[in-house]
Image (tube, rainbow, N blue to C red):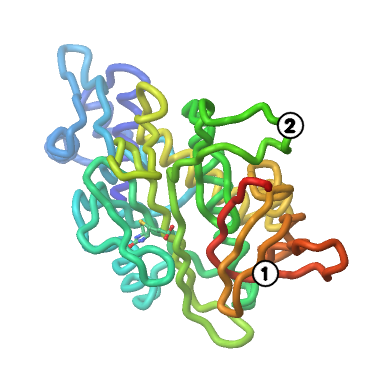
Amino acid sequence: MNQTRQRILAAIDAGPVSGPTLADELAISRAAVWKHVEALRDEGFVIESDDDGYRLIETPELSASALAHGLDVSFDIEYHEEIDSTNRRARELAEDGVTDTVVIASTQTAGRGRLDRHWDSPPGGVYSSIICRPDLPPAEAPLYTLAAAVATTRAARETGVDARIKWPNDVLVVDENSEKSDGNDGNSYETRKLAGILTEMKGETDRIAWLVVGIGVNVDDPGVEGATGLEAEVETVETNTFVQRLLEEFAALRDDPDAILSAWRDNALTPGRFVRVETPGGEVVGRALDIESPGTLVVEPEGSDDERVRVHAGDCEHLRPV
Ligand code: BTN
């Protein structure tokens, strides 16, 4: 991220500032100010200049400078209009020792989902991968996935979209029109997937070396059955603000790991629902009771005498009660 450009943006966002004043404040030449302003214009910023000086009129959607401008956490941003996979690029940077950097793209040609599935990444989405180096054992890594799900859900809800989490890390929107008032715990509704999360890491038994939290959010309607996008749910979304809020919420939870589970519960649909979970060890069907650290789902299987089952990973489906 270019610190000088960020300082210019902050200054001219507050009102007109002359070239000489900017040059003085930033201790650079007037020619250098002009070059930075031109570079920002090339990135899509609309910057007016008149006798009073430079003034920021419009910020483009999704560019490195636009995302960094006003971002309240210290992540570096690497933006690509198109990339194969932001997780692939983030892993590459992580191997080079980079941390606290977010790789963001508007479309991916080889987006990856969980369980080696393909992740459709058409233009008009926000595909991001956050590189972290937490001082945690690998077993605690799922907490970061939960934090990303909470951060995505909170940022989506701030745009007016009724987003909720399905265990462990799908962000869904409930279709209001499909809800039935049949007194069965509200289990009968349709949902559409808004976002998914894929966390990858490298580590030894006792320590994570790096963690890449990949978050794919549909903004435009992806036109795929069972999926939705922010702008399919509400008329307009300020994409830069959405991404900034997501990163700020993620950073806040990362700094306060004890708050993650309760924040997850507050935003989740799964506890209390009947679920079917496909796990590596077979299928678990029953009522989801709660989650435990670092993201384990506690299920009470069908048949009251059965013991509670703790599920660490799997594909979860919310069922309609019989
Ligand atoms: C899922 O299967 O639900 C998880 C999907 C995760 C997709 C995101 S998009 C950004 C990042 N880059 C990838 O290639 N995958 C993740």
Residue 12: percent from the left, percent from the top? 30, 25
Front residue of 290/300: it is 300
Q: Position of residue 11 (x, y in %)?
A: 34, 28
Residue 26 visible from this viewpoint:
no
Q: Residue furthest right?
A: 305
Q: Residue at x 16, y 19 (%)?
A: 49
Residue at (22% x, 13% y) in the render: 52
Is residue 63 among what the camera can see? Answer: yes
| Ligand 1 positioned in quadrant | bottom left
Per the image, label 1 sits on a secondary structure element best described as strand
Q: Dot 2 corresponds to which residue?
A: 183
For the residue marked with disc 2, what is the amino acid?
Gly
The one of 311 and 302 positioned closer to us in this rendering: 302
Q: Secondary structure at mark 2?
A: loop
Give, as a three-letter code, the residue at label 1: Val
Of the residues under marks 1 and 2, which one precedes in the sequence?
A: 2
Q: Quadrant of residue 182?
A: top right
Residue designated by label 1: 311
